Amino acid sequence: MAWHEKLTRIWKLRDLRWSLLYVLGMLVLFRIVAHIPIPGIDAGALSQFFKSNQILGLLNIFSGGSIERFSVAALGVGPYITSSIIFQLLAMVIPSLEELSKEGEYGQQKINQYTRWLTVPLALLQAYGLLTLLRRSSPLILPTITALQMITILVTMTAGTVFLMWLGELISEKKVGNGISLLIFAGIVSDLPRAVQQTVLAFDQTQFVNLIAFVAIALVTVIGVVLITEAQRNVPVSYARRVRGMRMYGGVDTHLPLRVNMAGVIPIIFAISIILFPPLIAQFFVGARTAFIAQFAQFVIQLFQGQLFYGISYFVLVVGFTYFYTAVIFHPERIAENLQKQGGFIPGIRPGKPTAEYLSYTLNRILLIGALFLGIIAVLPLAVQQLTRLQTLVVGGTSLLIVVSVVIETVKQIDSQLTMREYEGL
């Protein structure tokens, strides 16, 4: 089906059309909230501080520039994402949570409820840490602030995160995309016109070749992201025939898909959290009275400001967390056990432990490609800056990965909605 025919069908289906318009309205509301500033902040000093600190610029990926503007939604959905990751990890070590995650829709609803509860204290802590960092780094950003003003700002920022979390859940209920992912997508895309405008205003004829190189890198990156996101290794699986009464069941040949990028963007989020931690902590000790502590804190900040050390550390962390998170979500032993219970087997591989070992071996081989790809995507902005010398327009590899992944996921959900309505017609 051609794309224009698909758009025509979507527009003719009343409920699907209104769902898409509803989601669009929620995204517009999100962007309005993202431009409501918190009073008492010197916007000029804040913008100058972010330009001089490239590490904090990573946080803008998930806030759509809200942190730089210090709006009501300055924290974005970062605390909610952190809370979700924490419960995914806790489900591995706490048996009760692991059992709850296996109880279908009821268990998922309970875990989602716990995730919302944890989001509130995490948002408060992150807001307090961000305010303290800004006050210590540049006194001009928050010239004078009382205890009451501090509490008001903390509550406002936390309420902004809870509001975005609620918007994300409202969007997800429409079954045309993941709400949290779409909010991040909207934040990334909304900042693109400003970057293009800055590039056009600062354009120099001597940079024409660099601009062409930038466009070429962007196109290659988008193609690579699509290919890796959709790439998978199909492991053949056969089901033995079984006779029950007078009927015969089974005898089906199918496959088990192993995705190359099974972890998605979670490893990059993990790596960002880790790589932000040392310089953020060091910021608090720059003004320490002990000379050694102050010098060591300044050394840590300068070390992470260095392009080479920052790029290598970021790359290594992303690759390592790709293997770690895949081990968290993919259990070869459990899959082998389920296949054996259902009468399935991989041709040429014995059921049970040999099947689990074969799945682990196959996954580790294809996972290397996915891990290296995520690592390259993560450090791509640094490489593009060095190659093209364009400071106003940078190929955000992480941003492109999120944008392409969200678009693919949304298109698949819309296709499934169209397919479901075809069956309803029958």
Image (spheres, rainbow, N blue to C red):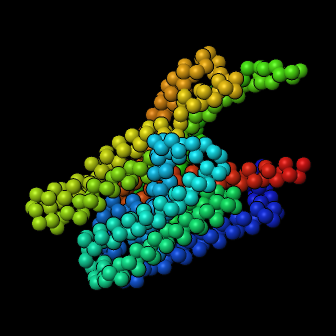
In-image side of 280 versus 1 (left or right): left
Q: Which residue in the rendered view is the most extreme toward the left?
A: 291
Q: Is residue 402 in view? A: yes
Residue 359 vertical position relative to residue 41 in the rendered view, above or below? above
- Residue shown at 31% from the left, 46% from the top: 313
Q: Is residue 198 among the parts visible in the rendering?
A: no
Q: In this view, does 330 lie above or below 204?
A: above
Which one is nearer the viewer's eye here, 419 or 174?
A: 174
Choose top left, top right, bottom left or bottom right for residue 322. Answer: top left
Residue 341 lies, in percent from the top left, at: 67, 26
In the rendered structure, the answer to whether residue 277 lies left or right of residue 298 reads right
Q: Residue 383 appears at what percent x and percent y?
A: 36, 50
Identity of the residue drawn at 29% across and 60% down = 280
Q: Where is residue 233 in the image (x, y as percent from the top left)?
A: 59, 32
Q: Residue at x 76, y 62 (%)?
A: 16
Instruction: Please report the residue visible at 86 percent of the width from the left and 21 percent of the height from the top.
Output: 245
Pick whichever, 84 or 185, lies toward us.
Answer: 84
